[in-house]
Image (cartoon, helix red, strand yellow):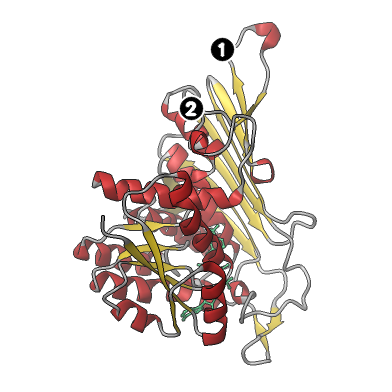
Amino acid sequence: MKPINIGLIGYGFMGRAHANAYRKVGHFFPQDRPLVLKAVCGRDGALARAFAETWGFESTETDWRKLIARADIDLIDIAAPNNVHAEIAIAAAQAGKMILCEKPLAMNAASAAAMVRAVTRARVPNMVWYNYRRVPAVTLAKQLIDEGRLGKIFHYRAKFLQDWTISAEVPQGGAGTWRLDAAVAGSGVTGDLLAHCIDTALWLNGGIAEVSAMTETFVKRRQHAGTGKLQAVAIDDASAFLARFRNGSLATFEATRYARGHKALYTFEINGADGSLAWDLHDLHRLQWFDHRDTGAVRGWRSIHVTDRDHPYMKQWWVPGLQIGYEHSFVHQIADFLQGLRDGRAAAPTFRDGLATDLVTDAVLRSARTRRWQKVRAR
Ligand SMILES: NC(=O)c1ccc[n+]([C@@H]2O[C@H](COP(=O)([O-])OP(=O)(O)OC[C@H]3O[C@@H](n4cnc5c(N)ncnc54)[C@H](O)[C@@H]3O)[C@@H](O)[C@H]2O)c1
């Protein structure tokens, strides 16, 4: 079978996570089309070459346009900051490439919609790396909900807490701190952290109708790594919102980079008439589950160790009882994308699903600005 030649853009955190997934997937999820790490692209040629050496890419590029123009590239993987997603993805679609894009899909929903139009017109397979859907315990939560085990859902509660920008000395802009520069990131924790929570929520509990939000920028001015000047900070440091789902359930969402002691605490809890479930990224192989139909004396929360062969993805890994971790969610995502290609169906989340999340984050930012409830616009 014809191999799939990958062109990866970005050799940072996600560049490593994706390269690792490409290298592993065929060993654990047998493939008929081999993946070839054809080229990695980054602006610094020496760093790109070092990355290629480490991860086994055949070649390097320093201009993503040259990468897209190459006839020997089948799939463009965008693991670069948010401000370049749309331009790269639209050019890649026009060149007929398959596209995997990091989240958030774009700087805002209008830009995300243009990306959806481009991949629809070009009919190219596309997917957004909302990898938390593929943590086995989260996938199991989806199965339990789809089987109707929670009954009518009343509440959804999600948080994503970090603490790495509390110091006013952290600059904005540049490598590692582009997330604090609105021109590169689009928004702060709303597009960065809440986007993950929203994607999971839309998947597990359906569409969000309206939101009421507040945001805060605790440190108003930071030195810009590019200009060296003290400049106004335009991202949100913290963001919290109330939401009403289309199914009638109520939700609270919160994200911040000012929760001292928390590094990446993504948690959610869902309460239904017949049961509740809860998940915590710091204990990602466990799903907490309460079943109201259990009989009285033994009724209580149980902690499911999601490592058994009948748990999602787990029979591909080790023996029951042995855990996997963060990196494996990326392996699962690429495995599902490749399965989708074989089956002739799109693996979610597609660009259209990524747009759905951007429409919610747009509404959140609009609500914080206007201090009013905002409807989530239709796709
Ligand atoms: N799925 C997740 O859980 C997750 C986690 C972290 C980051 N992300 C997303 O991944 C993307 C990248 O984040 P990161 O943490 O890897 O950032 P990073 O700063 O670690 O790496 C970014 C890379 O992009 C490169 N780059 C920047 N501009 C470029 C350009 N014009 N052309 C080519 N390369 C360019 C940089 O040189 C660097 O290699 C962002 O969209 C981010 O939101 C997703």
Q: Residue at 64% of width from left, 45% of height from top?
A: 281
Tell me residue 206's x, y (percent). Answer: 41, 40
Mark 1: give few (<14), some (14-19) or many (20+) Cα within 10 Å: few
Residue 277, relative to residue 110: is it above or below?
above
Which residue position is annotated with label 2? Answer: 144
- Mark number displayed over residue 360: none
| Quadrant where the N terminus is found in the figure | bottom left
Q: Secondary structure at mark 1?
A: loop
Could you tell whether 70 is left or right of 159 in the image? left
- Name the foreground residue: 348 vs 340: 340
Which residue position is annotated with label 1? Answer: 293
- Name the foreground residue: 56 vs 110: 56
Residue 299, relative to residue 199: is it above or below?
above
Task: State yes or no: discs 2 and 1 in contact (Cβ < 8 Å).
Answer: no
| Quadrant where the C terminus is found in the figure | bottom left
Residue 44 visible somewhere in the drawing: no
What is the three-letter code of the residue carrying label 1?
Arg
What is the three-letter code of the residue carrying label 2?
Leu
Distance from label 2 to label 1 (Cα)?
A: 14 Å
Q: Residue at 67% of width from left, 69% of height from top?
A: 217
Could you tell whether 342 is left or right of 271 in the image? left
Residue 281, relative to residue 277: is it above or below?
below
